[in-house]
Amino acid sequence: MAARLSEGAIASIVQGGTPSQPLLQVISIRRITNGPPRYRVLMSDGIHTLSSFLLATQLNYMGDEGLIAVNCVCQINRFICNTMKDGRRAVVIVDLKVVRTADQVNGKIGNPTPINEGQIQPLAAVANQSTTKSVQNDSTLGTASVHSIPAKVENQLPSRPGSFRSQPNSIAGTQAKVVPIASLNPYQSKWTIRARVTNKSQIRTWSNSRGEGKLFSMELLDESGEIRATVFTDQVDRFFPIIEVNKVYLVSKGTLKTANKQYTSVKNDYEMTFNNETSVIPCDDADDLPTVQFEFVPINQLENMNKDTMLDVIGICKSFEDVSKITVRSNNREVSKRNVYLMDMSGKVVSATLWGEYAEKFDGSEQPVIAVKGARLSDFGGRSLSILSSSTTLINPDIPEAFKLRAWFDSEGRVMEGTSISDVKGGSMGGNANWKVMLEVKNENLGHGDKPDYYTTVGTIVYLRKENCMYQACPTADCNKKVVDQQNGLYRCEKCDREFPNFKYRMILSVNLADFGENQWVTCFQETGEAILGQNANYLGELKDKNEQAFEEIFQGANFQTYICRIRVKLETYNDESRIKATMMDVKPVDHKEYSKRLIMNIRKHAAT
């Protein structure tokens, strides 16, 4: 098959034309290192060369892997022309195909010269040219002829479905030519995008040494890609009321800069900031634009990913906790939080934390499918997810992955316990997966691996060791170190290097937990110990000093009580002696209705097999 270069195509591009799928030869290619990685390509049409071709970032792999090399011939299937501040044109190649590799072409084709953008022939004259040059290929290919394809001059990009089109809307008094999000870069001066808002955060405020302010962010999507946009103080009141999720807008004249990947999962090397000149106009022509795009990561792969990775995840709400309140230390502000437990078809369960108003309004009673875009992975308590204000969360979304997951859960997943990769305190029983009886824990050697193991069991307390279960601790909020009585009315904390007139009581309680087949000594720290004894540590400490009999009665009353227990086990070595250390992570009374449901599901599961 003959390789043909499109003579005159570069002149057409420089003059604003859009030749259809021109064939060009790579003369040189180099990687740009100042800023996000990009490849700059010098290309030839056999007559002229142009050095301002750039590979779109999604094509970087072709440069990295050597798929595009000097002398290869490429078919440019889609490209975008941008006018830079100095008037020169930058051509962003969005899609291309290598039709002749470098070793199939015998060097440079023709004798092209660098194009002078100010001294080129009129476009019509170029379009009428049709000359042919010959190319000497290797012996297996024979002689190939290269001829020019008349440059097709268009005033707009192709208007077929799924392509980018010029809009009739007037932006700032001029006719706007829409460009794809994938082509945006900080070197452009004039651009307009047509994009759908897929996510919009709430207004947040900040206060620091440089002053106070507020901001909100959004994610914009078209068929070429997505970009994050942030609106700061002066523009918040202007844009926040008019921006609506899932609506489409024409956006122009924002400031573009390199994206901070720490705060976003949006797949773009750049991000946008609205300024005084930014224009946002609603656009009703939106049928061809996609909605939220996900790249879901299976839950069983989260353990192999780095902390703070931003990712997309989908799962069934296996269970959820009640809303709780915490105080943010940085600003002393109280916020709501709720943990939900997501399970997918891998059978793994992960804890995901909802914040603020969304945590308060969330209803997981129907076990919905939850899809999250832009969750942050944490290593707090094994592996867990935090759903941020910048995350997009959809309940029972209308996407194939959700339908497939729902069908799986209704047919078989509902009776699965799942295996938790999160070690944090659980809500109802479903979230604290990996149910075991104590004999299974012993026979399976849980805790003997490199990492601790976690399991949930129903156990009865048969003995509590009350000796040395209380100690006097540092009264500061963030320190629980044991204090030393100075015998002068003061108590010294070595960690804080301070003396205090008072102290607080802390608890380390050892209990013997048993079920029908085995028993296990378990250590309970402050919160779990208080839950078992039904009293707070300060009260118990004072009672021990003042009324030993009442203190004894509290311990007697805690015996032979049955709980659902979340336990951590790990083999530890002390003084050359190795033993399993079991720690109570969470404890709650048995909800016999829910527990019975679980037993019935297990019976049905075993009966089916």
Image: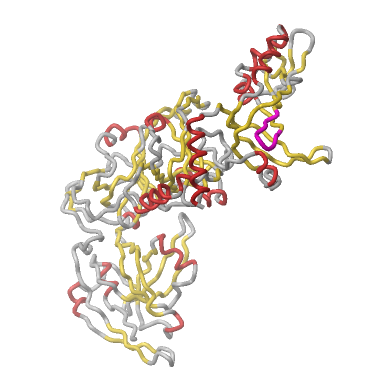
Residue 84 percent coordinates (x, y): 32, 57
- Front residue of 379/158: it is 379
Where is 323 relative to 138, above or below? Answer: above
Q: Which residue corresponds to the image point at 52% horizontal and 43% vertical from the top-left? A: 602
Q: Which residue corresponds to the image point at 25% horizontal and 71% vertical from the top-left? A: 19
Per the rendered image, the range of residues in magenta is 512-520
The reply, left or right, for residue 415 in relation to residue 472 is left
Q: Which residue corresponds to the image point at 46% horizontal and 37% vertical from the top-left? A: 319
Residue 379 percent coordinates (x, y): 57, 42
Q: Which residue corresponds to the image point at 59% horizontal and 28% vertical from the top-left? A: 563
Quarter of the image with the N terminus in it: bottom left
The reply, left or right, for residue 144 in relation to residue 337 is left
For the view shown, which residue lies furthest in the front direction? 607
Residue 130 percent coordinates (x, y): 23, 83
Residue 518 percent coordinates (x, y): 69, 37
Where is 106 relative to 592, above or below? Answer: below
